[in-house]
Amino acid sequence: MFQGMKKLLIALLGTNALFIALLTAQSVQSAPKTYDAVKLANYTACLNAQANWDIAMMHANGGNGEMNIRNHQVMCNLVKP
């Protein structure tokens, strides 16, 4: 069970990194924009924390539930770069 959770977490972290890479790539194509590295790190940490919370809630509910990435973005808007 721990191995499955570990693989899920690794996949999730990779998905967040891909999302941020795509997000920054779109901004670079539309207009030259620079990001503060600290703000970007805080946003990434917030997204990961929200995902970890969802995973913990699914475990607490006996494996039932779903992850809503859109919800994570809304929750992390305050620290979005």
Image (cartoon, helix red, strand yellow):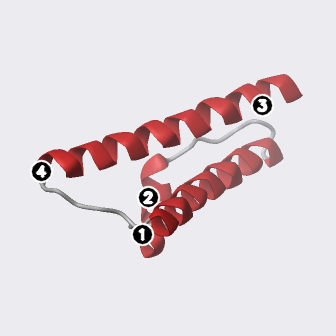
Place of residue 24 in the rendered image (x, y in percent of width and height, measured from the top left): 31, 49
**Quadrant into which the N terminus falls:** top right
The residue that disc 1 covers is 77
Vertical order, 52 against 39 (above or below): above
Q: In 3D space, how far apart are the residues under numbered discs 4 and 3 (Cα atoms)? A: 37 Å
Tell me which amino acid carries mark 4. Ser
Q: CA distance from mark 2 to mark 3?
A: 23 Å
At horizontal 55% and vertical 34% (from top left) the residue drawn is 14
Q: Which mark is residue 6?
A: 3
- Is residue 1 visible in the rendered image? The answer is no
> In this rendering, would 71 be left or right of 24?
right
Residue on which the image places disc 2? 73
The reply to whether discs 1 and 4 touch (Cβ–Cβ < 8 Å) is no
User: What kind of residue is marked 2?
Assistant: Gln
**Crowd class of label 3 (few under 14; some 14 to 19; many from 20; radius 10 Å):** few
> Which amino acid is tagged 3?
Lys
Compute the Cα span from label 4 to label 2.
21 Å
Of the two numbered discs 3 and 1 on the same chain, state the one appearing first in sequence. Answer: 3
**Cβ atoms under marks 2 and 1 closer than 8 Å:** yes
Task: Work out which quarter of the rendered image holds the C terminus and state it.
Answer: bottom left
State the separation of the CA atoms marked 1 and 4: 21 Å
Residue corresponding to mark 4: 30
Please, what is the three-letter code of the amino acid marked with disc 1?
Asn
- Disc 3 secondary structure class: helix
Distance of label 3 from label 1 (alpha carbons): 27 Å
Q: Secondary structure at mark 1?
A: helix
Answer with left or right where residue 81 lies relative to residue 42: left
Depth check, mark 4 against mark 3: the one in front is 4
Q: Position of residue 48 (x, y in %)?
A: 61, 52
Q: Nearer the viewer, residue 53 or 42?
A: 42
Q: Position of residue 16 (x, y in %)?
A: 51, 42
As measured in the structure, the alpha-carbon distance from the residue carrying label 2 to the one carrying label 1 is 6 Å
